Amino acid sequence: MADKKKQQPEWFRLDNAAAIFPGQNTNTWSNVFRVTIELKEDIEPEILQQALERVLPRFPGFNVRIRKGLFWYYFEKNPNKAPLVTHDVQNPCHRVKFKENNGFLFKVYYHKKKISVDTFHSITDGHGTAIFISTLAAEYLRLMGHDIPCGKMVYDINEPPKAGEMEDSFAVYATSTGKVKRTDKWVYHAKGTKLPTHLVNVTSGIMSFEELHRITKEKGVTITEFFAAVLLDILCKKQAREEKKQKEVSIQIPIDLRRVYGSETMRNFTICLRVKVDPNLGEYSFDELLRQVSYQLRLANDEKKLRAMITANMGLQENPVMKFLPLILKDFGIGISFAITAEQTTSSLLTNVGAIYLPDEMLQYVEKPLFMPSPGLVNAARCGVATIGDKLVFTFSNIYKESDVERDFFTTLVKMGIHVKIESNRESNEV
């Protein structure tokens, strides 16, 4: 245990992606996302608490609290006890309050067979939280008497963290001399009856990964490209029913840069790309949308272009004016900018955390995963995807009472021959 403590820095800066999130943290916008692993037996909260206390020292990026400096926020090692696991709530992904929860920036919930971790995006992204919850669930199962080995996305809590896990990979790979300009128009946003700010409608479709993969392979696209095209198709048709003047429809898609650069970081290392179509150019068939999405993503998802984007983002953070502007003014500027432009260039978000790889011995105790992005301000339905084994779960977090986007999305999949089982909290969120 002593070795692990040596690996925990006393303080460190937020990475490039994390730096803006504290200034955006409000009652209506949280930058908190959820990863869930559902087991096959009901959770024993006392055992889950023990597992958390054993696992937390292995993850120094989670074992922190946020502090204010004169010019920047920074993380410092949290001296407090691990946060208490609590029964799940009706407002998942609600804003984080820095002085609550023993100062920790994540929360662990349980409900029936589910373990959920809500994470403030400043400490990590979906990949980092998937590793954390996989390791937590494995330790819980061990304490319940099951023989679960380490491996894949289950880390050994008796080994110290690798040096690369605490790396700010944005800073490491910001070496391009090229310049990238991004010009995005304000785009279409679905209309509906907003829920109270403390509620969100969560709807998940559970399907077979292999069944879906056969269809996407036949069409020559990835699963993410396929889902993005379905979502674009639905939103284009919805806009045509709602609006006379048509705007671009755009889907924001975070890309895990670890797969490009081989990074082992447990901190943030994603960058967002956009796919979009302009309905004013004419009506797109689904196959045309598939080609557009695949072309746009593959053109943008180029190592040299991605490196130039990383460098451009780091350049803004390292700009002398921004670097030494007092934090109170930075927060004010970020808040004003976000209030004006938040989500205006994206119609929806589609984030695929991908496969959560678990040891074979653990799979027999696991039912399925869930990945849920935080609810938006004007993005009616934001989407998260996660897979364990043959179970792929597509989840909408929706700020509107209406469910037409979710209904049309899953109906489209069923018509294509994909079997989908629906789960939702909508009945408990009726207002």
Image: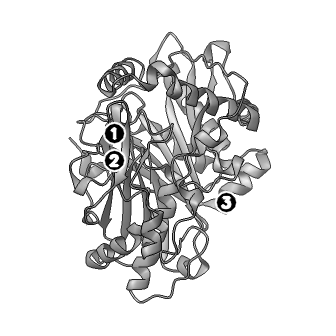
Look at the image and tell me in which quarter the C terminus lies. top left
Q: Which residue appears at 60% of the width and 67% of the height?
A: 357
Q: Nearer the viewer, mark 1 or mark 3?
A: 1
**What residue does disc 3 label?**
211
Which amino acid does the dot numbered 1 rest on? Ser
Disc sitting over residue 30 in the figure = 1
Q: Earlier in the sequence, mark 1 or mark 2?
A: 1
Question: Does residue 420 appear anywhere in the picture?
Answer: no
**Image-quadrant location for residue 174:** top right
Between residue 214 and residue 366, name the one nearer to us: 366
The residue at which mark 2 appears reads as 93
Residues tagged 3 and 2 counted as in contact (Cβ below 8 A):
no
Query: Where is residue 95 shown, x and y percent of the image?
Result: 29, 42
Would you say the residues marked 1 and 2 are in contact, meaning their CB atoms lie under 8 Å apart?
Answer: yes
Rounded to the nearest angstrom, the CA distance separating label 3 from label 2 is 31 Å
Mark 1 to mark 2 CA distance (whole Å) = 7 Å
Q: Kindly identify the residue that appears in the image at 73 percent across and 24 percent down.
A: 178
Choose between 181 and 421: the one closer to the eye: 181
Q: Position of residue 222 (x, y in %)?
A: 71, 47
